[in-house]
Each structure stands twice: as C-alpha cells, then as structure tokens.
Amino acid sequence: MVTGQVLADRYGRVATDLRVSLTDRCNLRCSYCMPAEGLEWLPDDTVLTDDEIVRLIDIGVRLLGIREVRFTGGEPLVRRGLVDIVARTKALSPSPEVSLTTNALGLSRTAAALAEAGLDRVNVSLDSVRAETFHTITRRDRLDDVVAGIAAAHAAGLTPVKVNAVLLRGVNDDQAPELLRWALTHGYHLRFIEQMPLDAQHDWSRAEMVTADEIFAALATEFTLTPAAEPRGSAPAELFQVDGGPGTVGVIASVTRPFCGDCDRVRLTADGQVRNCLFAREESDLRTPLRAGASDTELAQRWVVAMRGKRAGHGIDDPTFLQPDRPMSAIGG
Ligand code: SAM
Ligand code: SF4
C-alpha cells in the first residue's frame, strides 16, 4: 500500500484540494466560457461512471492526502447521480469537506437533498442581478431560477454561500457595487474573479479583461474596503472587509496577481484525466488503467507521477503562453 504518500510537485506544493468535473455539459452558455451553440460534448462512454468517480476520490482521500473535494463541471447539477455521489464521497474515510460549484439552475429543487447527503457548501456563479444583463452573458433568461436556487442553498444551510462574478468590459463592469450590495443584503459572500483565457472560442484578451485594480476602483466609489485580518493561505481570494465589516468581498486576481506559488489544487476531468493545473497542456489518463483493472496502488502511483510535472506558474503573461486545448467547461472550473 502507498498510504502516507502526498500529491507533491517539484516546487514543494502539495495538493489537498481535488476539483472533480462531473460533466462537461451545461444549461447556460456564458459568453466567457462557451459559444452560443454549445460545444461538442464528451462521448458518453468516456465519461466516468458514478462508481468510477467515487473510487478515484476514495484513492485520493485514503491514499494521497486529499482533504477537500469540490464538484464542478460543466454544470454538476445536470448530472443525475449527483446527490448519491455527494453522499458516497462524504461517507469516505477520512471524510473530506465536500462542496459544489454551480450555476444554481435547479438548485431550489435539490439544495435540501444535497445538504442531507452531507454537502458542506456551494459556490454559485452569478455575474449580474439585472435580468437583461444576465441574459446577455448567459444567453438564457433564467435569472429568477438562479436567485431562487441561491436562496434555497442558504436556507438549507449550505453556508457560507459564495457567489462568484466575472466582470466583462462594456457588459457588466458597471455593476460591481450593485452586485456587492445585493450579496451583502442577503448574507452571501461575493467574490469577483478575473476573466481568464479559458473560453472555448479563444476570445479572451489581456487588454480587454477587467483587472482587479479596476474592480477595486469601482467598489471604492461606494464602499470602503480594508484587508481582512484572516490569513489568505492557499485561498485564491484576497479578502476585504466592507465598510468595517462584518460583510466581506473577495477578489480572485488569477491573471494580474497570480497565486500559483500557494496552489493546493488538482483536477479530475469528467473523462478521467488528472490535470495538475487549470492551464496544464498535458493530462494523465486514469480512466484507461482504471477500466483495464489497475489496482488502487497503481492508480495512486500514476496520480503521484502526474503531479510531479506541475509547472511553477500558469505563465499567462509569457509571450509563449498557449491556452489549454480543453475549455474551462471541460476542465472543471
Ligand atoms: N457551471 C458551474 C458554474 O458556472 O459555476 C461550474 C463550472 S464553471 C466552468 C466554474 C466557474 O468558472 C464559474 O464561476 C465561472 O464563472 C468560471 N469561469 C468560466 N469561464 C471562465 C473564464 N474564462 N474566466 C474566469 N472564470 C471563468
Ligand atoms: Fe455553464 Fe458554468 Fe460555463 Fe456558465 S461558466 S457556461 S454556467 S459551465
């Protein structure tokens, strides 16, 4: 047995936080993520089954030091077995923290069942509380469903409910204070995320993206932000108290203030590939050996090797930077 191993890379970082993509499919079409017509989805037979997913997570927590599991996608709520996968993950030993990143469509129907299954928290993506802007960004008229889903998660105790927002120039970059006021009113923790070069269309541009400095400037027109006392650790968000607290706001400046040196993440795609970084250009296939009958120890060993190749940083500012072949929706954000 390889118990006691950790997912360490050559730069001294150890991955303890596993992001598991449950599907690359989605019911929204956020412009910074995928094109209006959607994408060619992964073939069904390449997508891991519920049993295969739980087995790999078990190897992660039992043999490799994974302590947190976050389910994502695509949209994880469109995966039929989600509640059961959450329950089985929570029942593993040692039991990890389990959370979900979701667009919240349909969450009002499943929040209570997810909480019952042991889900600890949710992060919901919402870029505008104006119906028109929401439609412009997501190409769907579903703002009310999302808002209801967030409220249901809060009511079910999936707290703190974090709301993630991406600002797009000329679309919603005038709405930062409005979003923050809305989040504070409801007791949600808002975090702004800088737009990253992970869209399927390759439309991202460094010159066009809204930077953390611009977000701070926009918030400063209506709020006073002071750095929060708690240490940031490996958390990607820089956290600020709003108007002396207790409300806070976070800014995840992945592009302009990269935090790669503190990264503790590893990703598993819906088709069973380990990615040691969002921006990795190489993946390590666990699905093929898994289906060929590899033992837990063999799979754990492959995973350990996959981590050793993790690069020091994402290199977005490097002239030689190349966007990964998979878009965000197929990696698992
Ligand atoms: N569908 C779920 C959702 O939207 O929360 C989970 C998957 S989505 C890919 C995960 C997160 O990635 C969301 O918060 C979304 O806003 C973010 N995201 C997608 N494309 C992005 C991009 N190009 N830059 C920054 N964040 C992005
Ligand atoms: Fe779907 Fe999430 Fe991508 Fe929006 S960001 S299209 S909700 S996967």
Image: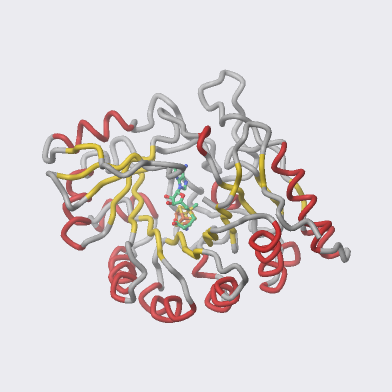
- On the rendered structure, is 99 left or right of 279? left
Q: How is the image coloured?
A: secondary structure
Q: Is residue 190 above or below residue 104?
A: above
Where is residue 117 drawn, in percent x and y? Answer: 49, 79
Where is residue 222 drawn, in percent x and y? Answer: 11, 40
Camera-nearest residue between 254 and 230? 230
Q: Is residue 245 above or below residue 282?
A: below
Where is residue 177 drawn, in percent x and y? Answer: 18, 44
Residue at the right extreme?
A: 292
- On the rendered structure, is 319 left or right of 288? left
**Residue at the image position 39 percent from the left and 66 percent from the top:** 104
Q: Quadrant of the N terminus?
A: bottom right
- On the rendered structure, is 36 left or right of 94? left
**Residue at the image position 57 percent from the left and 79 percent from the top:** 84
Instruction: Classify residue 283 by image quadrant.
Output: top right
Instruction: Classify residue 228 by image quadrant.
Output: top left
Camera-nearest residue between 167 and 15? 15
Where is residue 95 drawn, in percent x and y? Answer: 56, 69
Q: Is residue 147 above or below residue 259?
A: below
**Residue at the image position 48 percent from the left and 51 percent from the top:** 36
